Amino acid sequence: MIVKPKIRGFICTTSHPDGCAAHVQNQIDYVKSKPKLENGPKNVLVIGSSTGYGLASRIVPAFQSGANTLGLFFEKAGSERRPGSAGWYNSAAFEKAAQAEGLFAKSLNGDAFSHEMKAAALKIIQEEMGPIDLVVYSLASPRRTCPDTGEVYKSVLKTTGGEYTNKNLNTDKGLIEEVTIGAATQEEIDHTIKVMGGEDWELWIHLLADAGVLADGVKTVAYSYIGPELTWPIYTEGTIGCAKKDLEASAARLSAKLATECKGGSAYVSVNKALVTQASSAIPVVPLYISILYKEMKAKGIHEGCIEQIERLFRDRLYGDDLQLDETGRIRIDDWEMREDIQAAVAKSWESVSNENFSELGDFAGYQEEFLKLFGFGLDGVDYEAETDSLFAPASLS
Ligand code: NAD
């Protein structure tokens, strides 16, 4: 089949198997261009491992410290008639590259919130992997079905105060428009916490700890975002921010548990940089902020993508000499994004940005390029006119 991008709003409904493989290979090449990390993790579980930060969190330990990995995700396989989802092809490419280097790499495709997926992961860990020394929790999901009651919780992107209006980039049309975000009800806030908060992360860690499959000194990390004040009403102080606060409370409880039960084990929330991913493109206001941020960070030579962020997180913080925790105990790998000079420049551009000067103040070309790459389009060396194998699948799932 010949696959072309089909963009609908903030998603692309097609993905290119060879392009996704090239995107994964570029990330592997980046990690391999850095020195090995001898004290890095060796047996890793990544929950949400097929795209964005989770995919990078699988690639980094595999190719930085030779880790065996079990990856879990919710993706769609390709068929003879339709391409699969990007995360499916990313995972196929990852497994192929990892297995070529003799690394154990298995995947599970299904709902990470369910009892079935947790049991399936535990079985693989018990029978094929041995004690896990790192668990990365990197889910970004719009809903969660409670495995006990069947109740479906939906997360929303709303404020927790009144209505909020600001500039927004219509990424489909490349136009700046105004967007008004409504206020959430208490029920919507509670549901968002159920989906994107820490409850499920705690369930995973409790299950693994109780089964005795966590190594002494195990680490676990989940990801969060803070960003500048202009995004606070929709992010940090919005419904998603409430869920992230819940995640931080989970980290504190998990750390206390792992410290005693797993001899110095620890749990962290890492605050990461704003980046173009499938999850972030759905958040109002954020894509325009990202376009302006990219422009400033690229100009100063400090722009990073997921792979650079996670490589630095593992090398300098999680497995380095100094975690550099902030006042509330979080890892801040968003430090370059939040640098005073960067934020001052972004705030200045934000004030005056309009459709007339956007190409000067923002890096929309860079935004679009990265967005398309998420789905395997625009990668060097890929022949997009040629037939590609839509049935490409992770070896462990085929
Ligand atoms: P993403 O959309 O690229 O990845 C989400 C992952 O979760 C995928 O692997 C997907 O398959 C998996 N997933 C979703 N629902 C699932 C389910 N029910 N069962 C199993 N797997 C499921 O998202 P991302 O942007 O990499 O976000 C990952 C984390 O990083 C989130 O917690 C997000 O808040 C955080 N974060 C993102 C940014 C950003 O700018 N993108 C910045 C800081 C922190």
Image (tube, rainbow, N blue to C red):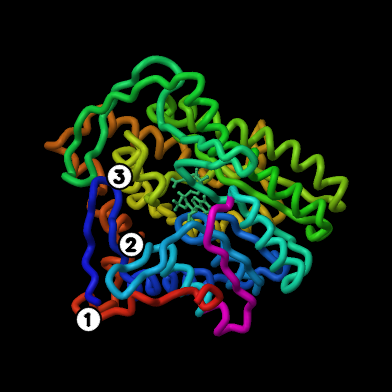
Res 40 seen here = no
How many residues crowd mark 2 within 10 Å: few (<14), some (14–19), many (20+)? many
Measured in 3D between alpha carbons, the distance from the residue under mark 1 to the one under mark 3, in whole angstroms, is 32 Å
Q: Secondary structure at mark 2?
A: loop
Compared with 207, 199 (above or below) is: above
Amino acid found under the numbered disc labelled 3? Ser
Measured in 3D between alpha carbons, the distance from the residue under mark 2 to the one under mark 1, in whole angstroms, is 17 Å
Relative horizontal placement of residue 173, taking residue 55 as reference (left or right)? left
Quarter of the image for residue 41 reads bottom right
**Residue that carries the numbered disc 3 in the rendered image:** 291
Q: Position of residue 130 (x, y in %)?
A: 77, 69
Amino acid found under the numbered disc labelled 1? Ala
Amino acid found under the numbered disc labelled 2? Phe
Q: Secondary structure at mark 3?
A: helix
Q: Position of residue 241 (x, y in %)?
A: 51, 30
For the residue pair 191 and 298, the one nearer the viewer reads as 191
**Residue that carries the numbered disc 2 in the rendered image:** 375
- Please report the bounds of the magenta region as a residue range: 97-112
In which quadrant of the rendered image does the N terminus lie? bottom left
**Residue that carries the numbered disc 1 in the rendered image:** 386
In the picture as drawn, the residue positioned furthest to the left comes out as 356
